[in-house]
Image (cartoon, helix red, strand yellow):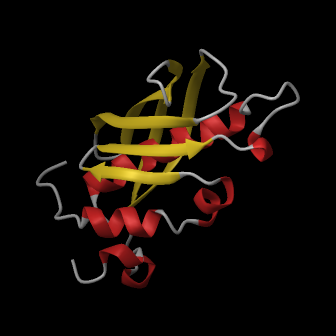
Amino acid sequence: MGERPAVDFDGLREYANQVPMYKLIGMEVVEVRAGYARFRLPFRRELTQPFGVMHGGAFAAVADSAVAIALWGLVGADKAFTTIEMKINFIAPVASGEVIAEGTIVHCGRRTAIGDVTLKDQDGRLVGKCLATYMILPIEDESARPQWSKGN
């Protein structure tokens, strides 16, 4: 991968917290640094499945997002990426409180990256585990670079 780009982690966190999907389901980027991101997703009735616990899709959304932001913090704003594979184990239900997702990049090559996510409830109990693979793409059009990176 070569030398790591300079990244404005506070700018990235603020930018990410304005992503419409994140706002829609109520997830928040709490911390980001190169190759790591921590999210929180508060339990809400709107995110439940028929048995009253958090829907697996909400778990998957916060896990996928934790890897994406961890990766962005590693590769910088001149790269785009997309999820090409994701596997998640649902270990325990969540019916209150919040889910904390910690994403870590375990491999980052020129074209692909792999991220590992641990999902815990507010008491620190393991509720899910995820492994995701991303395809990394260059951003060649300067106007397509995300706003958090302007001036880097």
Drawn side of residue 115 relative to residue 75, left or right: right
Residue 14 seen from this side = yes
Nearest the viewer among 36 and 109 is 36
Drawn side of residue 148 relative to residue 49, left or right: left
Residue at image point 39% right, 43% down: 38
Nearest the viewer among 5 and 15 is 15
Residue at image point 36% right, 82% down: 142
Q: Residue furthest right?
A: 50
Residue at image point 13% right, 51% down: 2
Which quarter of the figure has residue 51?
A: top right
Residue at image point 62% right, 66% down: 20
Drawn side of residue 2 relative to residue 98, left or right: left
Nearest the viewer among 113 and 120 is 120
Image location (x, y in percent) of residue 71:
35, 48
How many tags in the picture?
0
Image location (x, y in percent) of residue 44:
71, 44
Image location (x, y in percent) of residue 77:
32, 66
